[in-house]
Amino acid sequence: MPTKPESVTGNDTVIDVRDLSVHFGLRGSTLARLFGRDAGTVKAVDGVDLALRRGEVVGLVGESGSGKSTLGRALLGLVPITSGNVVFEGRDVGRMGRRELREVRSDIAMVFQDPNAALNPAMTVEVAVGDALRVQGVTSETERRERVVDALERVGLSPVELFLAKYPRDLSGGQKQRVVMARAIINSPTVLVADEPISMLDMSVRAKILQLMLDLKRDLDLSYVYITHDLASAKFFCDRIAIMYLGRIVEIGDTEEIFAHPRHPYTRALLKAIPDPDPARSVPRDLPRGEIPDAASPPLGCAFHPRCPVATATCGWESRDLRSLLEEHWTRRDAETYERERALVGDLDHLDTPATTARIGSGPPDQVRALLERIRAENPDEPLWQGVSEITEDGSGVVVRFHEGEDPDLRPAGGAEVACVLYGDDQG
Amino acid sequence: MRGVLKLLAKPFTDTVGLARWMLVIGVVITAAFIVCAVFAPWLAPYGFAQSAVDGTRFPKAGAPSGEHWFGTDRLFFDVLSRVIWGARTAIEVVILSILFCVVIGVPLGLVSGYFGGWPDRILVLVMDAIFAFPSFLLAIVFSFLLTGLFGGSVLAVALSLTAIYIPQYFRVVRNTTVSAKEATYVEAARAIGASDGVIMRRYLFGNVVQSVPVLATLNAADAILTLAGLGFLGLGIQSTDAAEWGHDLNRALADAGAGIWWTGLYPGLAIVLLVTGLTLVGEGLNETLNPTLRRRRLLPVVMPARESTTEEAR
Ligand SMILES: Nc1ncnc2c1ncn2[C@@H]1O[C@H](COP(=O)(O)OP(=O)(O)O)[C@@H](O)[C@H]1O
Ligand code: SF4
Ligand SMILES: [Mg+2]
């Protein structure tokens, strides 16, 4: 179990997320369902602990698909919670009835990534922003109007009269995001969950929107959960940063600590991928090798190990890694060699079932072994080889056995908490 | 007020060329029939089942004359009056049936599409089955059943037309709802605390009913034909209950051989004209409201280069 300093869950905690999991059942094809085959589940959020303190800005950072949005939505009870708790001011969001949920949604507000989609195209600005009051039971139209005007002024849409009767299609992206922001603050929430609020905006307005969010925080005593895939804006904006990967928090700590002493290999990779201080350029990323694995069947052991440059023997090596290794090897071979080696190795599809024992080959075992040795010799630093405990010949092929993997928990390391076998204060 | 006018004028200002002409002609024709329907008691020289005036009987199957511009039929009725009163029947039936379709079909599609699950699947199945059935046959069956219940009234015929057109409203609204409910603005509504009812009423409704007007006008044209068809078969409304073009055509069938052309020509013309008018409005609206068909009025792009070409983007 991850251990947490007691102070984190103290009195000033607004939202306390405890061992939260949100799993989505995948709906397979009709045919698959007919035959009763389970299409599996996506562990969008998988055992996350997080405490948001009053007045704090916590950043959730990670590549797309790491479960940031799902975690953010879970805070408002917008996704079904599989296990664990989201505790807001002492009450469990997952166990709330409709009335309570509605109240919570006036205390925790959300800003969405795409301002073009977050507003009803059939509502004017006044109606859209005012509806946040209306659903919370403000029936007086004059009161709604007054408060809408006030909220629009706060988010810098003035002269307000100019905007009240406008439809979203008449506004620019930045203006739309301000309207979304006005709708979010109009019920005087305590927490604002901002899901990549600037990533769809033009470069020129990004800084302004971030500044607006800082102003709102100061004026309205807000706490923020700021979701982003962009560490640079998190550095500017956040007090604390949680790095997420495949539904887990892999590193969490104060922003300075994360930037000064990044520990988790994934954090380091993300930091290296920040292009340069010029925020006008964000694209050319040098993210870790390989692709983000399929969230429906994450890697064994540490989920990051297939991409980790410093992975150790016990990081969870398995059959699918062997397949990737072979296929990657073949991208560097000519067609003829590929055909020959491919025939020697035989069918690879069974490797897709995760296992720590992998049987390959449909030819003389010694030749299969020799092929593996050749591949190893080409790049002896490939971390996978550390994970191989033995290769035995077996009939018409070889059996590759891997060390049992370890799935590291979040452990205190220096000024942060890291989920990596290489870190942990008890290990030094 | 100005906003409403602008909205009403939008289909006209947004279209050009053929689409605009279709719309204008269609609106003019349809409006003429609506005027006839509304002011029938004043426009028609006689009642629809009137066969005498001041005790003097009309001639039997009399040719068009000064007293009877369109002549009279074998039942001594004045054909012009019956054509005008027939407009009232047709419009009544169409408006009623569309009203029923919208009032039942739209909410049903919205709720079904929003909640999904097995009730949705069953409804889709039933509606598809109705839709797949030959509609005129279905209309005959329903008018048999409903005439038994309500008599040969406007209501009975309107309800049988509702039964055959409702699947279209259901399907259009249900399918748009299924895709619209995934939109971020729906989740945003949930995030401000909106209930399912509020989301359906204030967020989805306005966005999923947009294709209903087009559907309604196109169905109206179809409904006129179905109504006339039912009348022609002698089903539905009886001559003495109301004037109905299809029914009059049926009775005119026997006259044609005897050289009595006026009893058939005028009701027939009325049907053709009104169907044409409504179809033109429907297609014209379709051009404007349906984004996949719409070709916006585009200002020509003038290229600054040597050739100075004019391009029309699509
Ligand atoms: N409603 C849903 N149904 C099924 N899978 C989902 C749903 N929402 C998110 N997921 C899956 O959960 C994972 C995490 O998604 P998300 O929280 O959107 O990540 P992020 O915001 O970090 O990009 C993804 O693999 C995504 O496909
Ligand atoms: S546990 Fe640490 S070293 Fe091992 S794969 Fe994961 S991140 Fe890399
Ligand atoms: Mg996201």
Image (tube, coloured by chain):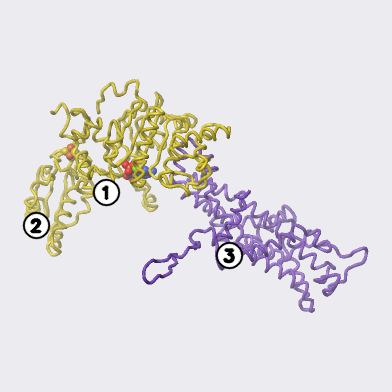
Q: Secondary structure at mark 1?
A: loop
As measured in the structure, the alpha-carbon distance from the residue carrying label 2 to the one carrying label 3 is 78 Å
Judging from the image, what is the letter of the chain drawn in yellow?
A
Q: Position of residue A248 (x, y in %)?
A: 27, 36
Name the chain under label 2. A
Q: Are marks 2 and 1 on the same chain?
A: yes
Q: Which mark is residue A364?
A: 2
Is B276 on the left or on the right of A122, as rendered? right
Q: Secondary structure at mark 2?
A: loop
Name the chain under label 1. A
At label 3, which amino acid type do we have? Answer: Arg
Is B10 on the left or on the right of A189, as rendered? right
Observer-side mark, 2 or 3, equals 3
At label 2, which amino acid type do we have? Answer: Pro
Q: Position of residue B144 (x, y in %)?
A: 69, 58
Q: Which mark is residue B20?
A: 3
Judging from the image, what is the letter of the chain drawn in purple?
B
Counting every numbered tag in the picture gives: 3
Q: Position of residue B24 (x, y in %)?
A: 63, 64
Crowd tier of the residue under label 2, counting other residues whose Cα lies within 10 Å: few below 14, some 14–19, many 20 or above: some
Label 1, on which residue? A283
At label 1, which amino acid type do we have? Answer: Val
